Amino acid sequence: MYGRLLESLATEKMARETYLELLDFTTGLYEQALPLLEPGSDDFSILSGCILLMVGLEKFVKYVLYTRNPLMILHKKIDFEDLIRLEKQEKFHNKNTISFDVALDRLVVLYPDLQEEKGDIRFLIKQRNFLMLNFGNIDIGKLEKHIQTKIGDISEAICLKCLNTHPKDVFKTEVWNKIGETRDAYKRGDRLELEQRIKHFKRLHFQGENCRVGK
């Protein structure tokens, strides 16, 4: 009976196991993050959504490196078995990979046009590390706004500059549409906020001029 139970559990485990490509991770994590970041979400939903987006971005950066050459993301020193697997075009799996920082450095070396996005990605890495490893004060609103805009900008840049492909053809169309819509909404909000501040200062300036004329 115990043997049959072990056999049943082993069969169930095998049924649940699947090979997830790095791009599958990115698309899935992006998709799961978006509902957590809907307007009105509580703080921990927002933080969870931010973490999922940033982990998804890390998987995406490593995906681009992996498609160039799987050996580019391996953490350990390359050995003969890795070369044989590459020669046979076999998939790599269950391997320790390089850090997000190292992956970013390698990506920019291969695609210098991403130099402009490098600073933004570094900022996201820093925020990801804080959320996952530390605790303390954090401006959730500022973090959310930055991530909602930059994840879209960076993902689009990587698609166009590294893969020469539109994001809709890399991610699910509905996932990318949602990311793009949210990003654009935040950017419009920033512009509207800036325009309102400019109008406010112009009004104050105009009132000041009238006061001086009245004197």
Image (tube, helix red, strand yellow):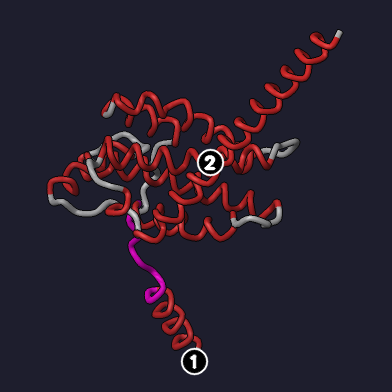
Check disc 1 and report its element: helix, strand or loop. Answer: loop
First to last magenta residue range: 14-22
| Residue under the image location 45 percent in, 85 percent down | 3
**Nearer mark to the viewer, of 1 and 2:** 2
Q: Is residue 67 left or right of residue 126?
A: left
Dot 1 or dot 2: first in sequence order is 1
Q: Provide residue 27's location: percent of width, then percent of height.
A: 39, 56
Q: Which mark is residue 182?
A: none
Image quadrant in which you'd find residue 153: top left
Check disc 2 and report its element: helix, strand or loop. Answer: helix
Q: Is residue 75 left or right of residue 65?
A: right
- What amino acid does circle 2 point to? Arg
In this view of the protein, which residue sits in the foreground, 188 or 45?
188
Q: Which mark is residue 188?
A: 2
| Residue under the image location 68 percent in, 53 percent down | 44
Point out the image quarter for the C terminus: top right
- Against 186, is 205 above or below? above
- Against 194, is 186 above or below? below
Distance (Cα) linking label 1 and label 2: 64 Å
In this view of the protein, which residue sits in the foreground, 6 or 106?
106
- Against 10, is 183 above or below? above
Q: Provide residue 128's location: percent of width, then percent of height.
A: 57, 39
Q: Provide residue 200's location: percent of width, then percent of height.
A: 70, 27
Q: Is residue 177 left or right of residue 123?
A: left
| Residue under the image location 48 percent in, 47 percent down | 55
Image quadrant in which you'd find residue 103: top left
Q: Which residue is mark 1?
A: 1
Q: Residues within 10 Å of mark 1 (few under 14, many from 20)?
A: few
- What amino acid does circle 1 point to? Met
For residue 15: magenta? yes
| Residue under the image location 13 percent in, 46 percent down | 87
